[in-house]
Every structure is written in C-alpha cells, then in structure tokens.
Amino acid sequence: MSELPGFTLTRRRSPVRLLRVLLRALIGLVIVAVLWAAFVGGLWLLGSNRLEGVPLTALREDVLLLGASGAQAPDDATTLLLLLVEPLDPTVPRPSPLVAPPVLLQVGGGRTEPAALVIPSSIEVVVDGQGLMSLDAVQRELGADRLARAIIDYTEVRLDHVVAVSTDALPGLVRELGPLEVCGGWGCDEPTPDDVRAWLRDPDVEEVLARGAAVLRAVAAQVDTSLFVRSPLQGRAVVDVLAGQVVTDVDLGVRSLIDLAPALGEVTPIDVDRLPMVRNPSTGELVVLEEAAMLRFQRLQDGLPFEDIEPEEDVERLRSVTGVAVLNGAGVAGLAAQYEAELTAAGFTVEGTGNDVRFDRERTVINYLAGDREAEPVAFLLAEQFPSAAIEAVDDPPLFEGEPVAIVVLLGRDLTTPIDGGDDAQR
C-alpha cells in the first residue's frame, strides 16, 4: 500500500499520553523521594532518641549531696568527669570496670588551655551506705552515677557532665568512618582501629587525652546532618557505636560530638596534673598527700591552672610540718642523736630524741596513729631512711615525753652492730 502525498501511516503520540507518562514518572520520583526522606528521617529520629543522655542523680540539683549544695566550679567553665572503661556489653547487667584513672577535665572559664586532674582509681573514698571503697570498686560494683557522687563529695568540685567511654568507642567510630586523617602534636596519620585501641591503653594519661581528642576531632569533621543523607547505613552504624559504647548525661546528637568540651576542637596542650601519692614500701599501697590534693581541687573550684604547682614542694612541706620523735631502742650510745641529724638534713621535723622503754629492740619500728592521713605518708617517707623498718599504725596517739606526736621512730639494732649499752646507753 503506497502512501498518499502529504500523509504517513505512522501513528503520532498523543500529547495527552506523553503528559501522562511524564506525570507518572514524576509521581514515581516523588514517591521514591518521600520514601527516602522517611527512611532517612526515621534513622535520624532513631539516632536522636538513642543518643539522648542518661539522667544521673549525682548531677541533679534537688539531690541533697555535697555536690549539689557545696561543690564549686566557675560558672562559665565546663567540668567533666571522664571515665575510660572496658567495652560495654548490654547483655551483662553489671557496670564496666575502669581501665584508666578517672579524670576531671575543665575547659572554658577563662582558661587558655584545658585542665585535667588525674585521680588514682586505687584511692579510697566514703560512699553513702557502703563505707570506704576504692574508686575502682565503686565503678565496678555501683556504676558511673555513684562514682560521680563519690568524686563530687571527695573533691568538692561541681560537675557539669559525666562521660563514660569504652575502649571500643573511638576504634569503632574509626572503623565505620575510616580511613580518617588524625592530626596532633606528633603529626598526621591514618590510624587503624587497633592503633586507636592501643593509644587508649597508654599508661601516660596526658598522651591518652591528646590522642583521644585528636581522634574525636577527626570523627566530628565527618559526622554532620548530611551523613544520614549521604550514607544512612553509615550514619546508623555511627549511632550504634555511640549508643552502645558511650554513657553520658548529655544528649550527644550526631552534629556535635565535641560540644561537651569545645576547647578540644582545637589542637592545644592540656594542662595535666596528678594527685601526689606516696608508696608504702612494705605493701606497695599508694596513699594520697591530702593537703596537696586539696590544693589541686581548689584550682578546679577557682578555675586556676596547675602549671605553677611544684610536686616536689608537696613532699617537702609534708616533711616540714609533721612532727617526728626518735627514740633509741637499740642500746647504742648516740644512735638517736645520729638519726636526728640525718632526718633533719633530709627535711623532716624532729620534735626531739630520747630513750625507748627497752634497749633490746631488734628491728626499727615507725609508729603513727591509724587513720591519720597526714602522718601516714610521712611514715612511708621515713621508711626510705630506714629500709629494714616495720611500719605500724597504732590505735592510740604516739607519745613523746607524755605529749602526743604524729610519728615515733623506735630505733632497733638492725641499724648498727649491736653493742652492750645496757641502761646507761646515751640517746
């Protein structure tokens, strides 16, 4: 069949039909966009809900604790209790133990750099209803809330927030978002999750804080609102890590990972100090120098730096203000006077010398009143002068010439070759 001039047998598409096709495609795109938005929005809401802060009674103003009524810190500063704990397991209904000492971190308040005070986890504090417990035991048995309450009572420093981070938190974020370029005072690198995990186990707390802050900065640079649009599954994975391995009273959100401590958003030195401690040479136990500790707590209460504190002066002052009496129990003429001179040269304050009630003492003994927290560390320092001495805490105050004294050193024959001095031995 031939075509007539000016005509064609090919059917032309109706403009109405073409419009219908376009309309259907547009509706399909709208449906897909709505479903995608609903999916992303759902993930966003889920993430926001899962990242809401956990209420902690230690931070409530209506709780009648020292921390609510008497603890202090500058109003324009943010003071955090940072806890590094073992990986959290939601199937285990027990608090995760500490893997590092608790840290009081303070930023703002006129500080040019963050200040961090490391509190040994072995020190014992009074816990309501429990008596004396080490900080490590408080966390392990009672959890972060009770630990925060105990630290507030002990330090009299007001806390704004508590953040417990497991050793899996930052490595998990690096795993989900990596590779990440992490920069700090050591330069820049792209650490693996295992690298970050090793950093967190470093015994140098200052290094842990510096590297942890650097990782946090790198993570924060990758996490914002658009993450859920760009990669919703990745955003969900980030939420899973944060919700599963971080416990805090703060609503973390996904846009402000470092809002807890704004100063950590910049590469800056951290003013780190530690509570001064003395070791018991007999047991290895560490005890805090109480007055020196109070000085550091006062710095956080007032928002002042630690950098001008000289740790050597803590021990020197303690030696100079704690009275020591030296008694000759060995029957060796002049022994007490000899050690009076040596102790005075070492910085101790010797109240006087005399004779013990007996001259057959084989071993030197250092006595102090049990529970005297100022005398106890001085007794340990004295033991450095008498390596073979026994350290004994006594129930009644030690006496010298009928008057109480902080410490009495009873010299024994272990200090020298015994001689027959009898009752006529001279002090």
Image (cartoon, grey):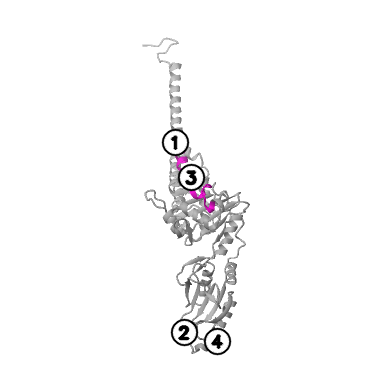
Closest to the camera, between mark 1 and mark 4, is 4
Q: Are marks 1 and 4 in contact (CB under 8 Å)?
A: no
Which disc is residue 53 wearing? Answer: 3
User: Magenta stretch: residue 50 in it?
Assistant: yes
Q: Residue under circle 4?
A: 426
Query: Is 375 rendered above or below residue 29?
Result: below
Q: Residues within 10 Å of mark 1 (few under 14, many from 20)?
A: few
x%, y% of residue 390?
47, 76
Q: Residue under circle 2?
A: 360
The amino acid type of the residue labelled 1 equals Gly
- The reply to whether residue 17 is in sight is yes
Q: Nearer the viewer, residue 195 or 402?
A: 402
Magenta span covers which residues?
A: 44-67
Closest to the camera, between mark 3 and mark 2, is 2
Closest to the camera, between mark 1 and mark 3, is 3
Closest to the camera, between mark 2 and mark 1, is 2
Q: Residues within 10 Å of mark 3 (few under 14, many from 20)?
A: some
Q: Residues within 10 Å of mark 2 (few under 14, many from 20)?
A: some
Q: Secondary structure at mark 1?
A: helix
Gap in angstroms between the C-alphas marked 2 and 1: 83 Å
The amino acid type of the residue labelled 3 equals Gly
User: Magenta stretch: residue 105 in it?
Assistant: no
Which disc is residue 42 wearing? Answer: 1
